[in-house]
Image (cartoon, grey):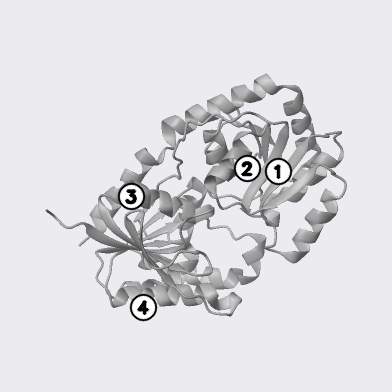
Amino acid sequence: MNQKLKIAVIGLKGLPAFGGAAVVGESIINELKNQYDFTVLSISSHTNEKSGYRNNYFQKVFKKIPFGKINILYYYIRSAIYVLFKRFDLIHLHHRDAAFILPILRLKYNVILTTHGMVLTEKWKKYEILFSIQDKIFLNLANLITTVSQKDLKIIYSLLPNYNKIIQIPNGVTLNNINFEQADRITFASGRIIPDKGCHLFLEALQGINYNSEILIVGDYNQMSHYQKILIDLSAHLPNLHFTGLIKEKDKLFEIIGSSRIFVYPSLIESMSMVMLEVASLKVPMICSRIQENLDVFSEEEVLYFEPNNISDLREKIQWAIQNPDEMNTYANAAYSKVMDNYQWSNIAPLYANVYQSLIK
C-alpha cells in the first residue's frame, strides 16, 4: 500500500475553524485528507485543541506567547523552523502576510501560497508599507500562488509582472440541505466586525425604518475599541437589536442565519466572501454592497445590491425587501442554484490536489 504524501499547512492558526481563511483551509483538508497526510500548524491563541490527530489529520499546536502584538509573528517563525526539522513533501502556506517566511521554507520545500485578500482593511492600513515591501521581496519566492478571487489575481499580476505561476481557485461551501423555520429577523454576521464590514452602515440605515422585529449582529466586535463604541451607540436607538458575540459552533451559527428573514452584508472590501457563499447555501435572501468582488460571484438576479457606503440606498433596499418577500426568495433560490453549480468544495478541492501533484518532488 502506498504511503500518503505529507503536506504541512501553515497560516490557518487553529482548527476547528470559525471564519475566514481557516474555513477555506479546513474545507480543503476535509475533502483531500484521504489522499494526503496533512499536518496543520496552529497556536493555542486560536484553538482549544491539543496537539494530536483529529478528523484524520494531525494538528501541532504551539503554545502562545504573552505578547499579543507579536504572537502571530512568533507563530509563523516557529512554524517555519518546525518544518525544517521534519519531513514533508510540500508546504501549503495561507495568507500573503506570511510571505516573509518563504526564504526559510524554500531552503527545503516547494511551497504553494494561497492569498485570501490583497487589499488591507482599516485595522492593518498603518502597516501598509511593510506589506508592500514584503510583497515585492518575498511573494515571488512561492513555487505557485493561488488566489481566491479575480480581484486578488489582478493585483498580484500588477505586483509581479514577470511571475507567471498564478491561478485562481474560488472558495466554496459544503451544502447541508437543511431547511430552517423562518423567524421574523434581520441578521448581520462577520467573524471579525471591523469598519470595512460595514455594520455601522446597517445600523444607521435601520435608524430611519420603523422596524420592530429582531435584529441580530453576530461576530466578534471587540476587534477595535473605538469602532465597538460606535456600534453600541448606534444600537441604543434599536431596542430589539442584540449582539450575540462570536459564535464558533457552525450548527448554531447556521441555524441563526438560516432562520433569518433577510441577511444584510454591507462590506466595503472583500476578496471572495465566505459569508455570502454560506448564506446563499442556506437559501436566505441577501442584501449586499454592490462592489466588484461581490458581483464577480453573484449577479443582480441572485442578490439585492445597494450602492456601497450609501445609507439611504441601503435603507430603501431593506424596506423593499421587507415588503417583497416573494421576490427576495426568488433571489435566494437563484443564489443557491449558483452555489450548487459552481461553488461546492467537492468540485473545488480537486483543483488544489492538481496543484499539489504538480509541485510535489
Dot 2: few (<14), some (14–19), or many (≥20) neighbours within 10 Å?
some
In the structure shown, which secondary structural element does the residue marked by tag 2 occupy? loop
Q: Amino acid at mark 3?
A: Tyr
Residue 8: percent from the left, percent from the top?
33, 64
Residue, disc 3: 352
* Residue 236 in the image: above or below residue 58: above
Distance from label 2 to label 1 (Cα)? 7 Å
Q: Quadrant of the C terminus?
A: bottom left
Q: Amino acid at mark 2?
A: Ile
Pair 4/2: label in front: 4
Residue, disc 2: 291
Distance from label 2 to label 3 (Cα)? 27 Å
Distance from label 4 to label 2 (Cα)? 40 Å
Distance from label 4 to label 1 (Cα)? 43 Å
| Residue that appears at 75% across and 33% down | 318
Q: Earlier in the sequence, mark 2 or mark 1?
A: 2
Judged from this view, the residue extending furthest toward the left is 1
Residue 87: percent from the left, percent from the top?
24, 71
In the structure shown, which secondary structural element does the residue marked by tag 1 occupy? loop
- The part of the image, by quadrant, that contains residue 324 is top right
Using the image, tell me which numbered label, if any, was put on residue 81.
4
- Is residue 273 something one can see in this rendering? no
Q: Earlier in the sequence, mark 2 or mark 3?
A: 2
Pair 4/1: label in front: 4
* Residue 329 in the image: above or below residue 37: above
The residue closer to the viewer here, 43 or 334, is: 43
Dot 4: few (<14), some (14–19), or many (≥20) neighbours within 10 Å?
few
Residue, disc 1: 308
